[in-house]
Amino acid sequence: MMIFKLFFSRITKDFRQKELLPLKLLFFVHASTLFVLYPYLTIHMRELGINVEETAIMSAVTPVVAIVMPPVAGMVADRIGNFRILLSIFSSLGGAASLLLLLVPVGRVTVTYPERVILDVGCSVEQDRNLHLGLSRDPPCTFVPAFSDGKIHQVETTLEACGFICESVTGSQVTPISLLTNDEQDMSQRILRTQRYDVMISSDFPKNAKEIYSYALTSEQMPSVDEDRDLRSHRFRKNNDFYQTSVRNISNNSFFFPTTGLYNLSCVIANTTYKCQFGNNASVEEGVSRIQTSRHRFKTSLLLANTNATDNLFLAMGIKNWAGVSKKKMNATCSDAFTQDGRKVSISIPLLESNDTVQLSNCRPRCLLTAPRTDVCSNLETEEVYDIRLTFWSYLAIRVFIGMIGGTAFAMFEGAVIAILREQSADYGLQRVYATIGGMISSPLSGMMIDYASRGKGYTDFRPAFYLYAGLKIASGLLMLTINLEFKSPANNVVSDVVSVMRNIELVALFIAIFVLGTAWGYIESFLFWLLQDLGASRSLMGITITVGGIAGIPLLVLSGPIIDKIGHANVLFIGFIFYAIRLLGYSLIYNPWLCLIFEAMESVTSSLSFTAAVTYAAKLSTTTTDSSIQGLLGGLYFGVGKGAGSLIGGYMMKAFDTRPTYRMFAAACAVTGLLYFVFNTFYLRKRPQVEGNDIVKKKVPTSEPGGPEEIGFYNISKEKGLNNGMNENRKTETIPIKALGLKSYSSAEDNNSKNKASVECNVNFGYDATGEEQNVTMGGSAIQKCEKVTDDSRNDKQNGEEEHEKHQRF
């Protein structure tokens, strides 16, 4: 009950600060931009044909190249002071630049062949009374080992339609399509699009007898023409399922004309043999057949006629389950009533867009069968490569450009946030709550928009996500103009201040830890959706993963202050390592994509709580003049180098070891690193002076005036809590030696700008209240002992041997 009370009281108290309302709205919109597009970029690259190795390289190079910008931008921001206009420009420019990714062409496409192959069946022309089957050459087929080894292989076949196969005017059945002239290719296309053809059957007995059957097709009886020029829309090839109505290619220059009901293929059992016959069973009304070919399944035992030939000819060595009769395999013979009676078949085709008519002769009766592709062919897909270099380098260049702009905006934004929170004495975790809410809403919204735009297409349409991202980035840029940074004064010596802060081993350890955490985050960010896509997850589910992590993270963000204050920044980071290990291991064990939501809930610890601890930890260890610079380094290591390393290492490990083992290796690395950081913190850092707590608000030192003290950067100060021993004394005083940058009193503004600062040892009396739950430390002029310091050489030279003055340092 106390937790709920604390939860709502912290939110209510924070929301009453009207000065922070623009910052909350900005957090909401700014975080929405991160979750609208970035989680989907990996599968967007996959959609363009960029493979896992290229994705790893790109995901690694982009943030590593862009790492230069956050620290530089942070220093520039600290030097400028009020940088909101520059921040707004970079944010808006990043949104507009993202639209350039839509111009990157497809580099390669993995084409999946149809699930069934088409075979034509008929009697042997050599009159060996065997059923012969021919396999369509398009798409190409690599036979399964059983056929290649000359073995008999049983295949589940379905009778689809019967008609005639006629050769085109080229007169050659093996002419490659690339060798056909433009006129011949155009002729072939016009034949395939015809909606009318006449079947003429002539015989010598009775003399000059001729039968004509006309076939007129409606638009509904023909396949629609796919006019989508996007190469990705043709990734999944489909058969023309209009078997009984539409004309189709059997080989490059042979065409099949269905004559539904004119004749049929029938097989009857005679003793232990199937006798199959192509016979005339037409019932004609006004010259047009109305009888449908009976469609049924049966099993055929096939033998490749010649394993060295290229004509894809099979011999039917037996039939089983014809029309549901006899489950025993029997030999099959074939007879053709048309050729036996001396009849000849030709087909006349009136061409569209002209008055010409094409006459095709040498036609023979054949029926179409279909069979599962996996039973006949071993090649289920193929890769068509276009200009992959153009795709890779153009995508990489745009990503690097966007990354540099985004890194710059990130460093400035975090610096602005820390500066505002210092000024308003506010809590960082409470502001990130609204960023989490933004991600919870925007990510599933983006996923649903992508799914909606992709309906009926053979590829995933990511355009809605890009448009939404650009709009939110521009809106974020406009909102940044509303924040107030007038109070932030520019820093005079940014580089020297940053160097002095970086000498703290505690901050260096934090940066190493955040780099490893960024590596784990980068791998998950780059390849979690890749794994979910392999498991068959929808884009909507991918968006929901962000929502689940956000919902679980809100309570931890609200209570991040008390949690970090209770157990410490370093321990929170250690917990983050352990939860990363659990998440990564869990992903490697799931096969149902929905189970990922269990581990996505742990993102509340790995991202929400851990990164909040890292940001506030860095703010605690930095100074007011180095906020943006340190936050830029922190963000660069986490979102830049760390993420890039995770993407690069993870991509190559997936290529070498597969996906699931890679997740487990990353889990082990996180667990080991977390334990090392915990040991280092417990046995080394805790013995050093350090600041505990989560409050990032520092006491402001009054601006230096001539004759007054100059503001300095403090080393961390710690006091032993054991001094608060619960005795009746209400006031305790202890003298603690500290080291600080030298503070000197100057007699003029010129002297006050001196850059000659040195470290001195001072003894400072700390008074604190030992009553109540809190220990209030007070430092005043009477409590600070005078620290002596040697006058610097340059001042001695300037004063030509004047008497050395005593310098007082105060805080």
Image (cartoon, helix red, strand yellow):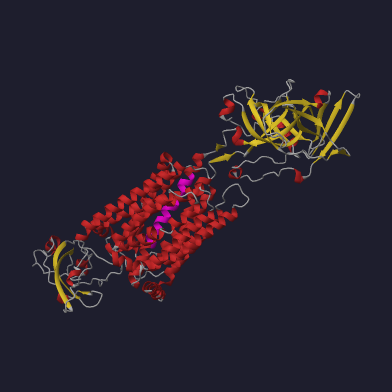
Left or right relative to 492: residue 533: right
The x and y percentages for residue 731 are 17, 78
The part of the image, by quadrant, that contains residue 770 is bottom left
The x and y percentages for residue 31 are 45, 61
Left or right relative to 799: residue 632: right
- Give the number of callouts: 0
Q: Is residue 396 magenta?
A: yes
The x and y percentages for residue 373 are 61, 36
Query: Is 572 in front, or is 194?
Result: 572
The part of the image, by quadrant, that contains residue 423 is bottom left
Residue 69 can be seen, yes or no = no
Query: Is 489 in front, or is 622?
Result: 622
In terms of secondary structure, what is the magenta stretch mainly?
Answer: helix
The x and y percentages for residue 220 are 75, 46
Residue 64 can be seen, yes or no = yes
Query: Is 149 in front, or is 298?
Result: 298
Looking at the rendering, in which quadrant would you find the C terminus? bottom left
Residue at image position (8%, 67%) is: 803
Left or right relative to 423: residue 455: right
Span shown in magenta = 394-413
Q: Is residue 619 above or below residue 645?
A: below
Q: Is residue 226 magenta?
A: no
Looking at the rendering, in which quadrant would you find the N terminus? bottom left
Query: Is 544 in front, or is 593?
Result: 593
In the image, farthest residue toward the front: 271
Q: Is residue 706 above or below residue 622?
A: below
Residue at image position (36%, 70%) is: 486
The part of the image, by quadrant, that contains residue 344 is top right
